[in-house]
Structure formats: structure tokens, C-alpha cells
Amino acid sequence: MRIVPIAAAALAVSLIGGTVIAQAAPVRTRGTIASVTASEIDVTTRTGEKSYKITDATHIVGAKTATLGDIQKGSYIGSAAVPAGGGKLRALEVTVFPASMKGAGEGHYPWDRGPSSSMTNGTVGSLISSQGSTMTVTYKGGQKIIEVPPDVPVVSVEPSDKTALQAGQKVIVFVAPDGGTAGAIVYGENGITPPQ
């Protein structure tokens, strides 16, 4: 699979249609898979059911539970965060990418996890662990210091395929620019909810 970075997240996740998307985050739909076929996914959300086409260009990524110990110096990560004061950020979640996805969504940009939330995808430089962690994350054109409280969800992701999608799984659908196609789907393995 060819990895193309775009300005969205946690996910390899942010791979939509082989094109680079501007620094505005794509539309995301979060919910539970109601049904899925080889060509369509129906997702139950808080506001009702939404349907999206699945194509050969749809990127599928599985997320599973990880720990702070899985974040090492040199790890490529994504973190939704909010301001913590003093120029630092406080993580709301951390996604650890495999080496094959290094560069996915690299950068720092607005996110939809609440007021002033952001997503930072980059490489971990310094890492200090003590009742949580504080990490320096470097990306092209910048660097952020992110505090990671011990109770923050940490997941790792791996490329997958549509045969892994099943009714009942929690998902995030990154909607392609046409509004009706899934550009990327992140599903939770073993019953977890992708935290991005």
C-alpha cells in the first residue's frame, strides 16, 4: 500500500484517495458498524445511520490497545491534544504508527475533539516518563511538547483490509471529498473504540 500523508490524523488514517488534502481536517464519522459489504459500510452514529461506499482506494486500518511503554524515542505518533499552559499540550489520546506509516498526516493542525483541540503527527524526540509521560514531537516545520497523563488512551495501528470489518465494531470513517465514499476507515480491534 502506498502511504500518502494528508492533514489528518491518527490515522493512516488520514489517507484519502491518494491525494494531498489541505490543512483543513476531513469530515469524520464516528460510530458502530451496523452492516458492511464489500462495497458499502453503514455506521450507526449518535444522530442516526450513515452509509458510505467502500472502494479499492479506501484505506482500512486496525487499532488495538497499546501502552505508554510502546512509545519510544524515534516512534512516529499522532496525538489529539488540548492546550496545557506554558506552550505545552495535554494529550487526549496517542496513536502509535508502524514504521511503514511514518509520515502519515505529518504536522500540527486543528482537530474536532473539543474547543482548541489539535492533532500533532510526528516523531518522538525526548521522552520523560514519570506518572505519565512528557514527549517532544517533531514534525516538518515545528515541534510540540505533549504531556501524556497516565489515563490517556494509547493505541497502535496497522494497515488492514475490508475483510476485517464486521458489524458491531467501533469505527471512524474519514469521508472522501465527494461526501459519499469512505476515504479511510479505522476500526477498533477486540471491542475497543478508536480514540482519535
Image (tube, helix red, strand yellow):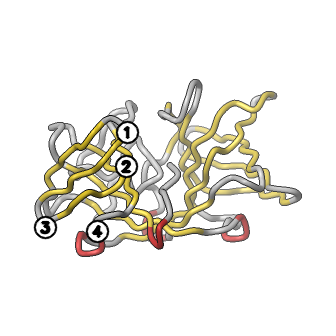
User: Which residue, given by chain and number where applicable, does mark 3 sit on?
Assistant: 38
Which comes before the other along the chain, label 1 or label 3? Answer: 3
Decide: is 116 above or below 135: above
Residue type pointed to by label 1: Arg
Q: Earlier in the sequence, mark 4 or mark 2?
A: 2
Q: Is residue 85 above or below residue 104?
A: above
Q: Residues within 10 Å of mark 1 (few under 14, many from 20)?
A: few
- What SS does tag 3 mark? loop
Rendered image: mark on residue 31: 2
**Point 15% across, 42% down: residue:** 180
* Tag shown at residue 127: none
Question: Which quadrant is home to the N terminus?
Answer: bottom left
Decide which of 23, 196 is in the foreground and name it.
Answer: 196
Distance Cα–Cα, label 4 vs label 1: 20 Å
Q: Give the label, 4 or 1, closer to the camera.
A: 1
Say which label, 2 or 1, has the lower sequence index: 2
Q: In which quarter of the image is residue 61?
A: bottom left
Total numbered labels:
4
| Residue that badge 4 annotates | 165
**What residue is at 54 percent from the left and 40 percent from the top?**
119
The three-letter amino acid code for the residue at tag 4 is Leu
Secondary structure under tag 4 reads loop
What type is the residue that disc 2 sits on? Gly
Q: Alpha carbon of mark 2 to alpha carbon of mark 1: how far?
A: 7 Å
Secondary structure beneath label 2: strand
Q: Position of residue 150 (x, y in %)?
A: 77, 56
Q: Mark 1 points at which residue?
A: 46
